[in-house]
Image (cartoon, rainbow, N blue to C red):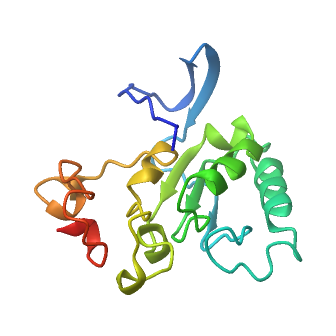
Amino acid sequence: TRNYLLSSLVELKPGANVLQIQGQQVVIDLPPEDRGIRGVFWADPCFSSRYVVCSFGKAFQTLDRSTTLLNTAFEDKSMDLFGLLGDNLYDQGGEVTEEFFSRVSLNVKRRFWLMVNGNHDNWVCGSPICGSPKDNFGIGQMQYYPMDSIASQDNRVFSFEIDPDQHRQWNRFLNN
């Protein structure tokens, strides 16, 4: 996609932390240690049939209702976390994710996010058997969901030094 992620390490203290991001003031609330957190967790959110069959997206107005739910829930200052637990919007080219994020408020975006790749995030069809050169193996999602885990150290599966386009073997994870 045409999006990018600008990231840096910042030191946060428990409570409200005011940051300037792209000229906009953003408050990041870090929960105190040893306190529980409040959050919303989703898996398999589907509202578009652009890349997969989404049988009930229009009938149930999934995009409108889901973003309204998130925006309303995160008006509450006690909310800490939003988690997407796989098959994140069934997007292959970025347009579906862009539409979702254009409707999500800064109150949601400024909270901590937990994101897990599902099989449809690696191959939009859900399996390496039907993988295509247009699949991004979840790498394209880093533009929306910053991920950097200890699991990426010394692990070729999570190495961003590997060019997934180099071998064009779309039936294997990251072509390695």
* Whole-percent x, y for residue 59 in the image: 89, 77
* Whole-percent x, y for residue 126 in the image: 47, 80
Please give the name of the residue rendered at 49% of the width and 56% of the height, measured from the top-left corner.
114
Where, by quadrant of the figure, is residue 16 drawn? top right
Where, by quadrant of the figure, is residue 171 drawn? bottom left
Number of callouts: 0
Instruction: Decide if residue 162 is on the left or right side of residue 53.
Output: left
* Whole-percent x, y for residue 68 in the image: 84, 54
The relative height of residue 73 versus residue 66 in the rendered view (above or below) is above
Instruction: Decide if residue 154 is on the left or right side of residue 124.
Output: left
Nearer-the-camera pick, 8 or 61: 61
Please give the name of the residue rendered at 77% of the width and 46% of the height, measured from the top-left corner.
103
Please give the name of the residue rendered at 61% of the width and 47% of the height, measured from the top-left corner.
80
Task: State the residue lying farthest toward the top.
Answer: 23
Please give the name of the residue rendered at 81% of the width and 68% of the height, measured from the top-left corner.
62
Instruction: Decide if residue 4 is on the left or right side of residue 101.
Output: left
Q: Quadrant of the C terminus?
A: bottom left
Nearer-the-camera pick, 13 or 60: 60
Task: State the residue lying farthest toward the bottom.
Answer: 129
* Whole-percent x, y for residue 74 in the image: 74, 47
The relative height of residue 160 versus residue 17 in the rendered view (above or below) is below
